[in-house]
Image: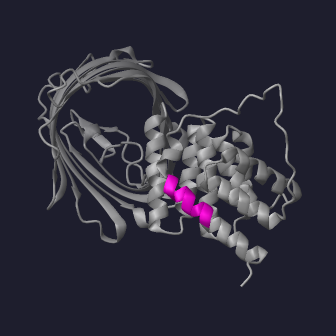
Amino acid sequence: MPIGPRRLRSAALFGLASFALILGPPLFAVAQETPKARTATAPQMVVVDLTPQEARLHALRAVQAGQMDAARRLSLALLQQDPDDMTALMVMAMAGAKTGYTKLAIIAGKRAYRQAEHKGQKFEAAYLTAAAMDKAKRPLATKLWLRRAAEVAPSDASRDLAKRSFVSVARSSPLTLNFDFGIGPSDNVNGGSLSDVMWIIGLPFAITDALPGGVWHVGVSGDYRLHENATSQTLATFALRQSGVWLSQEAKRRQPTAKASDFAQTAARIGVTHRMRPWDDRPVTLEFGLSAGQSWAAKQAASRDVALRLRAGWSLSDQTLISGEIMANTAQNLRDGRRDATSLSFGTSLVHQTAAMGRVSMGVTLGQIDSAARDLDRRSLGLSLGWRPIWHPAGTVTDLQLGAQVKDFPKMIGLDPEVEVTAGASMTFTKIDYMGFAPKLTLEASRNWSDFIPRDRRDVKLGIGIASTF
């Protein structure tokens, strides 16, 4: 049976898809090519008349034979006749990138994606557009188009290909970005006490009690690789976070003068981190970090701090990692100099992956804060436990956390040490993700028992956010 134009186009696209799948992640690991320089003497040209069907076949054969320049010229001729020729757009997206014509390749890939009639075509177009973006050295755009390719992948194999390519690009790119978002109700948006009155020598004094409502936050963090070799890596780090609240009707009734803007907070941080493996024959990693940050509360500058972090990690096996950390911090309160503080903490943790139970972690932290403010100056001991079960029912990844801390305030004479217990659970629903982003449900609860009434508080909040599944 003769092959008609529609059948020919489908067959051509299937061949191109197979070729793209064979190439796989190496599309994103080859250095960018540049167009060949034109010579002073042009070669003698032979004119051959081809029908559009024949030109498509020749273009696809040129791609399969690795003759990308010929494929690009044929696809360009086809597009001059029909700018919506799907086969020509696909060939241009691939061949243009391979021969250094990345702008043409990107335009063709985007146009093919918009015109694609089914998931198979959309996947091919998105994947080839990502490859062209990678050739143009645009890592953020490359990762965006790989997420699009994963979203429209017609099969698990195609989706896995897009995910592996995403990881390859992320590793090779010097810039890494992470986004964070969460929103949900809370019974203590202001960090207030469980009581609204504190008694002193028999007299009542009004204090800020817990206000119900909701909390939200949005943040971006990341790093830029400044240097890397086989044994060390240096990164410039940054983070920006904005958080806010909304007040319930009950909160407005209890505190008529309170405004949500009073509790808005912004934090920014920059720093440098250096990682190294000092011994080739030992699985030990050392990390040094120096950072500086500033926070704002209610749109006014609140504090500045500088932190130094030293960390050592030792892989006991492929399943077990032990680490230790020392952190020193000096903070300046921009509103009340009496609340300036310096802190020092020591921590150690153990992470173990088991085939039967999943990943288990535990940690111990000793801390000390020195400050003229009696309610800041303290010594503390903290314990933490974490568990990620190996079971993921319906693609749901669960994380459980439990923590306890004992805090002693030596300048607050006559008070027993405070005890704080925290618990949290999060569930990431990986089966309902969009472009590699999945909804994440988080439940957090904390209770702080204190003889100092303003610090005797409880907080329970439920949040929904997003998490990357790549």
Q: Residue at x 42, y 67 (%)?
A: 431
Q: Position of residue 152 (x, y in %)?
A: 57, 64
Where is residue 463, by image quadrant? bottom left
Where is residue 453, by image quadrant? top left
Horizontally, residue 74 falls left or right of residue 152, namely: right
Horizontally, residue 36 falls left or right of residue 359, namely: right
The N terminus appears in which quarter of the rendering?
bottom right
Q: Position of residue 72 (x, y in %)?
A: 73, 48
Magenta part, dominant SS: helix
Is any atom of residue 165 visible in this view?
yes
As drawn, the residue found furthest toward the bottom would be: 1
* Vertical order, 49 against 320 (above or below): below
**Residue closer to the observer: 94 or 206:** 94
* Vertical order, 173 against 292 (above or below): below
Q: How many marks?
A: 0
* Residue 116 belongs to the span the image colors magenta: no
Q: Residue at x 38, y 19 (%)?
A: 305
* Vertical order, 233 against 153 (above or below): above
Where are the magenta residues, as a range? 15-23
